[in-house]
Amino acid sequence: MLRRLFALAGSLLLAALCSTSQAATATPDTSTASSEMAEGKVLVAYFSGTGITAGIAKDMADLLQTDLFRISNVQPYSVADMAYDEKARANQEQKQADFRPQMVGNVSNMEQYDTVLLGYPIWAGLAPCVVLTFLERYDFAGKTIVPFCTSGGSPLEPSIPELQALTPQAHWLVGKRFESHASRDDVRAWLQQLNLLGAHTSAAVLDQTAALTQSDQAKAPVFNFEQHSVMLNSGYEMPINGIGTYSLLGDTCYDAITTALKTGVRLIDTAYMYRNEEEVGRAIRDSGVPREEIFVITKLYPNQFFQPEEAIEQALKKLNIGYIDMMLLHHPGHDDVKAYKAVEKAVAAGKVRSIGLSNWYVEELEEFLPQVSIMPALVQNEIHPYYQENNVIPFIQQQGIVVQGWYPLGGRGHTQSLLNDPVITKIAQAHGKSAAQVILRWNLQKGVVVIPGSSNPAHIKENTELYDFELTAEEMAQINALDRNEKHDWY
Ligand SMILES: Cc1cc2nc3c(=O)[nH]c(=O)nc-3n(C[C@H](O)[C@H](O)[C@H](O)COP(=O)(O)O)c2cc1C
């Protein structure tokens, strides 16, 4: 129990520490040698909440021409159950060491398999509880188990000991964490490393047929501080300050958007995952503000990437405001190129005006951009004084892409410490502004669009009053020096 609680608390930190690299340490009784891989029939068994691990597992079974078993709960997880909220069902279940949700279906003849490739997403630092149900159900004595996972950054290794403890007579090999955007070739390479694929299946060259119109001369977008806007590479103008709606639900969201529009805010950021597109749309329709004056961003979540056309139609229907100004892909994930291409078609059809990405960093962009036709107009990532992304922002801007920051004020649980940072409060006093305004202005002067979320009318107004003062180069440098590379969320 304690270990699960600890893992939950530590998962954010782990995600931050491990966001780009995979820890390589093996648990003591785990072999690494691929020569130890058992001969014989392989089963790919996986659990997947939002479809990312599913895509990788399917590629695996397909490449191996072997059987695939989906581990599913009798009571499936809804989007709300998997919300980024400690109170949501999945996170609550992860805290209970002995919780074993009932499983649907059955592997009819487990005896025939010598090796099980076991996949799952990392939830609160560990394997989802239903994976434990699966391991308890069968006799794995003498079988080889090779775990793999996907995650927002947390490593695989901390999830292994409790799984091994349930299968003391199984032979565990060191597994692998896949990036959420892992390609079929990444999967193939791992299977080869495990000696599960013959030499004839060596990695195929990626089919990068689509050429980008990107050019070396592309210039960083310049903010117009008179108009409070920026011209996107898609040809549309976008406000440089707006309101974020993450965690604003129902009437709270409707009221916040209504207040924001009355206050002059014209940029609104929502997402399928926030479960408030309907309220955002209704507040816009009721506001009396001409549609053309408002810029609305929404996002497709990775579990929608496999049927992107439907997901786009769903967003259009929920928002019900005619067109969508910008659609982002919420995270890298399986089929993200396919989803992006569907948004490209929606642009051609006039349903969506601009396309962007969220939570894409340098490596992800380098891999993704050559595969698509329309250059993204915007990339939205976590950016605040304690997590500045100083190496990522210029990379994005130099390609003519606008950068937008989420969690500009540090995010839930961190806002107060950031707003009370002595460097920031001192600068705020000097300008007669609030700490929040100083942080938002610092973003703008770095060329980062801000979308602070709030339901408090006073804060909503305060967050718009960013244009009657300017930070000096020295003040900018002082805030730049606060960077701790401290990510406040896992994606
Ligand atoms: C309830 C929940 C908890 C999560 N906890 C973590 C975590 O602690 N660390 C992490 O890196 N990612 C975390 N994630 C992100 C998932 O591991 C990641 O998105 C994964 O690729 C999803 O795979 P799936 O689509 O197969 O479910 C969490 C996701 C959910 C829904």
Image: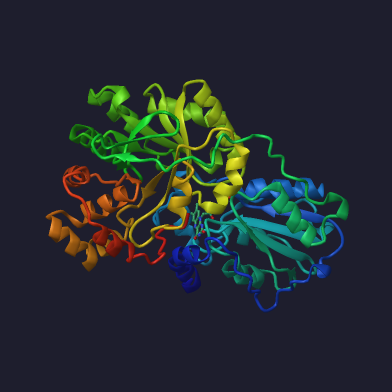
Q: Residue furthest front?
A: 217
Residue 373 falls in which quadrant of the image? top right
Q: Residue furthest bottom?
A: 28
x and y, in percent, of residue 179 in the image: 60, 54
Q: How is the rendered protein coloured?
A: rainbow
Residue 441 placement, left or right of 161: left
Q: Residue at position x 77%, y 66% from top?
A: 144
Compare residues 293 and 164 and report the one nearer the observer.
293
**Is residue 105 at all visible to an observer of this figure?**
no
Determine whether 278 is above or below 383 in the image.
above
Residue 170 placement, left or right of 47: right
Q: Residue at position x 19%, y 32% from top?
A: 262
Residue 155 placement, left or right of 253: right
x and y, in percent, of residue 471 in the image: 22, 54
Residue 362 placement, left or right of 34: left
Residue 160 falls in which quadrant of the image? bottom right
x and y, in percent, of residue 206 in the image: 72, 44
x and y, in percent, of residue 277 in the image: 38, 34
Compare residues 289 and 221 and report the one nearer the observer.
221
Compare residues 231 and 488 and report the one nearer the observer.
231
Determine whether 468 is above or below 480 in the image.
above
**Is residue 127 at all visible to an observer of this figure?**
yes
Count of numbered circles on the image: 0
Determine whether 238 is above or below 5 in the image.
above
Q: Residue furthest left?
A: 432
